[in-house]
Image (tube, rainbow, N blue to C red):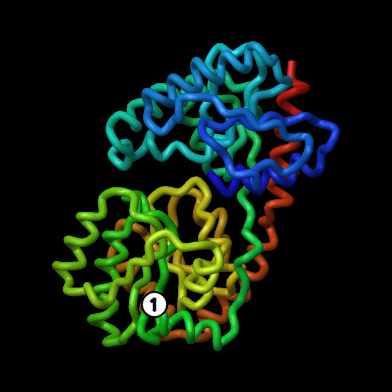
Amino acid sequence: MGWFAYQTLKQITLKNPNVHFVFVFDRNFDEEFIFADNVTPLVLSPQARHPFLYYAWFQHSVKGLLNKMKPDLFLSPDGFLSLGAKCRQLPVIHDINFLHHPQDSKWLTSKYYNYYFPKFAKEATRIATVSEYSKRDIVKNYSVDAGKIDVVYNGINSFFKPLSDVAKEETKKKYTAGKNYFVNVGSLHPRKNITNLIRAFYLFKKESDSDLKLVLAGPHYWGLSEIHKIIAETNLKEEVVFTGRLADEELKLVLGSALALTFVPYYEGFGIPLIEAMQAQVPVISSNVTSMPEIAGEAAVYIDPLEVNDIKNAMLRIYKEPQLRESLIIKGNLQKQKFSWEKSADLLWQSVLKSINSN
């Protein structure tokens, strides 16, 4: 969500110098987010990082501002709206995983999302979302007219690119003692299905007798104790590498040096690592559910995320078949052309204009 907001709003504000944009923050902000002279930043309290504070911020602080300012549109890149505000509103609802898997969020957060997001969807002038899958999901579960929803795909950050053999070797020396590795990119969140990935990696190691490692590149979320429990049970402590959150340039190296991306969530509204791997010319193993086949197209080996043996077999294929890896890279070079932040910004701006001009 952060990259979506940053990249689309940067291009939209720069491309529309005659439009006045007000960026509303809940804390002190970095000047890099004030992209142009036509952006006015405002800070409203309280800092909204808890469901009670979400309510206070959106339903009181932001709502009061909107009713006073009377903007043409309130655009919310993370989907929250100010119910009852006297202006048109456009939320970007990236996905509704919290409806299908409420256990993946903290109890109060899940309750808040599942109570308010149907209301946001109903009150919204229009809705933007990041895949045709998410659009269908919102239409089906929130009884929203499909004509009210605009699909705005995510883009690919420009720092991802193919690496030289020297860069790959240096990266492997740093993270895996020079060994090849599979990589998973993303927060260590329950829906990312890391536990099944580790179980599959354990079976892969037994069958292949290889020295490959598994790199988990992303910040810790919650549910980490279960991950460490499985690592202990499978005796993989020396084989699984946790990098934590990585700076952009470092993530570029870690993804670009991998034998393959192993991206096996059981739910995604889009799945940005899929197209980032294509940009880095890294083969992809992907789940075959929700939005992921739509985003990866023909440029992935697909697995059932609930079947550990399925994931393991895909790892074995990638490991043993260099021609398969090359084929996936070629297909990825074609598939990634469907996505760019410029296209995303243009589609979001079209949705903004439709919202403003709606009856």
Q: Which of the 4 image quadrants contains residue 280?
A: bottom right
Label 1 neighbour load within 10 Å: few <14, some 14-19, many 20+: some
- Residue 244 in picture, x, y percent from top left: 38, 61
Q: Which of the 4 image quadrants contains residue 129?
A: top right
Q: Nearer the viewer, residue 62 or 147?
A: 62
- Residue 173 in picture, x, y percent from top left: 41, 84
Q: Residue at x 44, y 19 (%)?
A: 56
Camera sees residue 309: yes
- Residue 79 in picture, x, y percent from top left: 53, 32
Q: Residue at x 60, y 67 (%)?
A: 160
Say which residue label 1 marks. 175
Q: Residue at x 73, y 31 (%)?
A: 21
Q: Nearer the viewer, residue 126 or 246?
A: 246
Q: Which of the 4 image quadrants contains residue 333?
A: bottom right
- Residue 158 in picture, x, y percent from top left: 66, 63
Q: Is residue 276 left or right of residue 104?
A: right
